[in-house]
Amino acid sequence: MVTDTGGVNDQSFNELAWKGLQDLRDENGWEVSYIESKQEADYATNLDKAVDDDATVIWGIGYAMSDAVNTAADQNPDVLFGSIEGSNDSGISNLVAVAFKSHESSFVVGYIGACMSESGKVGFVGGQKSAIIEQFEYGYYAGVEYANKQKGKSVTYTGQYAESFSDAAKGKSIAQKLIKDGCDVLFHAAGGAGVGMLEACNDAKIYSIGVDQDQSKLFPDSVITSALKKVDVAVASVTKGLIDGSIKGGQNLVLGAAEDAVGIAETHDNLPDDVYQEALDLFDAIKNGEIEVPDTKETFDAYVKSL
C-alpha cells in the first residue's frame, strides 16, 4: 500500500489500512509492505515503485491519491489496484474504489455530542475541504439537529477546516479557538491534524470525539466516542476478493451501516449507558432505512426542514 501524506502512523485510515494488510499476512502468510508519501508529488513515484516491486495488489490510501491511482491502474492493466476513498468513474477494469458512508457514523456521534454538551455549543475540525470530508461535517451537524429535536435542546454548531491532514499544531490551534468560543464537545475528520484537536480538548478538560478508529486510547479521559470507518476490514476483504476473483475491478464500492463498515467505538467509559444505547438504536434505525442521513449542504438543508 501507498499512504497519503498523513503517513502510516496517522492514528487514522492509513494505519487502519495497514492493519488490514497485516491481518492478511498473519492469516495467509502473504507478503505485505507499505510506502509512505511525504508530499503529493510522491504519489505517482511510489505507486510506480510498488509496480516495480511486483506487487499483486496495490492500494492507494485517501481521496487525494485517487487521480494518481487511476493513472497507475490505467498504465498497468496487469496489476490489481484498490483505492480507499477514491473513485473509478471511468470503469478502469483492474481498479476497485472503496468509499464509506461516513456521514452515517458522523450523524450518530453528532447526536452523542449534542447530548453531552453542557455549554450548548459543539464544534468540528475538518482536514482538507472536500466532498468526502463534508460528509463527516454535514452528517455530524445533522445528528446535532436530530438531538435538538428529540431532546428539546438548542445546541449550536461551528465547523472549521485545517486544510491539512498532518499539521497537528494547526488542528490544535483551531480547537483552542473553538473552545475559547464556548464549544465543549469537538469532533474531527482531520487525520494527524485532528490529533492536535484531541490534545487541545484533553488540555482543556472538555469532551472530544475521535474518527476512523477508536481514539480513546490516545486520551482516555476526554475522548467519549469515535466514528469508526472500518478500513482494515474493507482492505482485507476486498484484497482477498480481488485475488480469488470474487470481486471484480471496474467498480465503486460504497460501504455503510448496512454492511457494518461504519460504526461507533465500543469503548464508552465516559458516556452514560442511556446515551450509548440510544446511539446504538440510532444505528439500527439507519441500517433499517428509517433515517436517511444527509451528506451534502443541499441534503442537510432539506433534512433540517423535515425535522
Image (cartoon, rainbow, N blue to C red):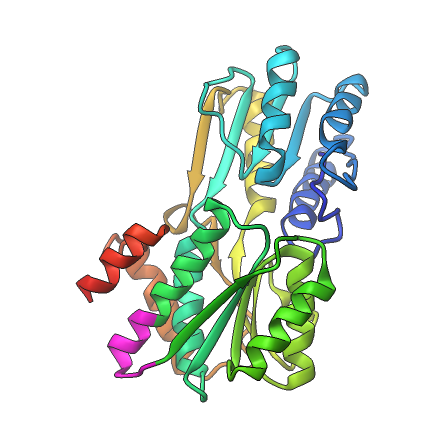
Quadrant containing the N terminus is: top right
Residue 173, relative to residue 63: is it above or below?
below
Front-lying residue, 79 or 120: 120
Name the spot of residue 239 as percent of width and height, x first. Answer: 60, 30
Residue shown at the point (37%, 80%) measured from the top left: 155
In this view, which residue lies farthest toward the bottom?
118
Q: Horizontally, is 302 left or right of 177 in the view?
A: left
Q: Could one spot residue 72 in this view of the protein?
A: yes
Span highlighted in magenta in the image: 145-154
Residue 17, relative to residue 212: is it above or below?
above
In this view, which residue lies farthest toward the left?
306
Quadrant containing the C terminus is: bottom left
In the image, residue 153 lies in the stretch drawn in magenta: yes
Q: Quadrant of residue 278?
A: bottom left
Name the spot of residue 65 as percent of width and height, x first. Answer: 63, 34
Q: Quadrant of residue 194?
A: bottom right
Residue shown at the point (36%, 67%) measured from the top left: 143
Name the spot of residue 241 as percent of width and height, x first. Answer: 54, 27
Name the spot of residue 219 as percent of width and height, x first. Answer: 68, 75
Front-lying residue, 274 or 215: 215
Residue 108, relative to residue 37: is it above or below?
below
Q: Could one spot residue 207 in this view of the protein?
A: no
Residue shown at the point (69%, 64%) measured from the top left: 170
Residue shown at the point (79%, 35%) measured from the top left: 35
Q: Horizontally, is 49 left or right of 207 in the view?
A: right
